[in-house]
Image (tube, coloured by chain):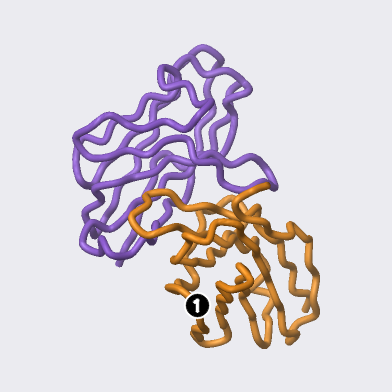
Chain colours: A orange, B purple
């Protein structure tokens, strides 16, 4: 079983839709949870960062962590064509150097 | 803040030659840098972890003699692909941890280097 599971998609939504992206994980030691956005042929860009359980909101983006279910989500409200990218979840345990990445979900927002 | 650059952004080389890729943290000090490889439509694969002033730690299956990593300063790490072959063609991405934010485990990524070996 992989440490982090993420549906690769692809996911296509109309402009203005609410997008839900999810990851599950198996390692209960993970405490730090991140979402990265990667445009084609570019490096990943950190979008959201969360420590432990709870919600975090930043503009149109909301990150949720449910440690009891080992499940994290990223919601994008009022999606825009510029949101079209691959979204990678990543997580790590305290004191660890490594990040464990999901495979990424490719999102396309259709105008 | 937290900008990481990579050079070159793309490179084409002949089989058998060596290619050096530089990764720099521009506005912070990075005691730890990471090198990843990414194939089309796939996620990031960690190749090695590089700590300033010490030898890199390679992931299982990554040949350390083929992928030479040097982290000579707090702002620069280099990856040299030696005797490159077509199967080494890939997108290589580095990331860096901000030493000033040791309590976090955020990694800031460079823009990547696309290597094509003919």
Query: Residue shown at 52%/22% (left/top)?
Result: B13
Q: Is residue A40 above or below residue B91?
A: below
Residue B78 falls in image quadrant = top left
Q: Residue furthest top?
A: B16
Query: Residue shown at 78%/61% (left/top)?
Result: A10
How crowded pointer 1 is (Cα within 10 Å; few <14, some 14-19, many 20+) is rated as: some
Question: SS at mark 1?
Answer: loop
How many numbered marks, from 0 up? 1
Camera-side residue of A6 and B98: A6
Q: Is residue A76 left or right of residue B74?
A: right
| Chain at tag 1 | A
Residue beneath disc 1: A53
Residue B54 falls in image quadrant = top left
Q: Position of residue B71 (x, y in %)?
A: 26, 36
Camera-side residue of A81 and B34: B34
Query: Residue shown at 36%/32% (left/top)?
Result: B57
Q: Is residue A72 left or right of residue B73?
A: right
Q: Is residue A58 left or right of residue A95?
A: right
Q: Is residue B62 above or below residue B105?
A: above
Q: Quadrant of the C terminus of chain B?
A: top right
Query: Residue shown at 49%/67% (left/top)?
Result: A33
Q: Position of residue A15 (x, y in %)?
A: 75, 82
Residue A23 falls in image quadrant = bottom right
Camera-side residue of B63 and A31: A31
Q: Position of residue A14 (x, y in %)?
A: 80, 80
Q: Position of residue A107 (x, y in %)?
A: 72, 66
Q: Quadrant of the N terminus of chain B?
A: bottom left
Camera-side residue of B60 and A67: A67
């Amino acid at each position: 079983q992989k440490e982090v599971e993420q549906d690769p998609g692809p996911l296509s939504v109309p402009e203005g839709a609410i997008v839900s992206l999810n990851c599950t994980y198996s390692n209960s030691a993970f405490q730090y949870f991140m979402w990265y956005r990667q445009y084609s042929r570019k490096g990943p860009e950190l979008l959201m960062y969360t420590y432990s359980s709870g919600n975090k909101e930043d503009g149109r983006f909301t990150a949720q962590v449910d440690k009891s279910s080992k499940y994290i989500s990223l919601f994008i409200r009022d999606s825009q064509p510029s949101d079209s990218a691959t979204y990678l979840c990543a997580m790590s345990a305290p004191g660890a150097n490594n990040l464990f990445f999901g495979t990424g979900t490719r999102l396309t927002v259709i105008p | 803040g937290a900008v990481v650059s990579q050079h070159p952004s793309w490179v084409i080389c002949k089989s058998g030659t060596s290619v050096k890729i530089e990764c720099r943290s521009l506005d912070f000090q990075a005691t730890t840098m990471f090198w990843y490889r990414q194939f089309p439509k796939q996620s990031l694969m960690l190749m090695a972890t590089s700590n300033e002033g010490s030898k890199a730690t390679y992931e299982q299956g990554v040949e350390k003699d083929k992928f030479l990593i040097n982290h000579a300063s707090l702002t620069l790490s280099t990856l040299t692909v030696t005797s490159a072959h077509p199967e080494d063609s890939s997108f290589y991405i580095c990331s860096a941890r901000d030493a000033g934010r040791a309590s976090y485990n955020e990694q800031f990524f460079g823009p990547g280097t696309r290597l094509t070996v003919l």
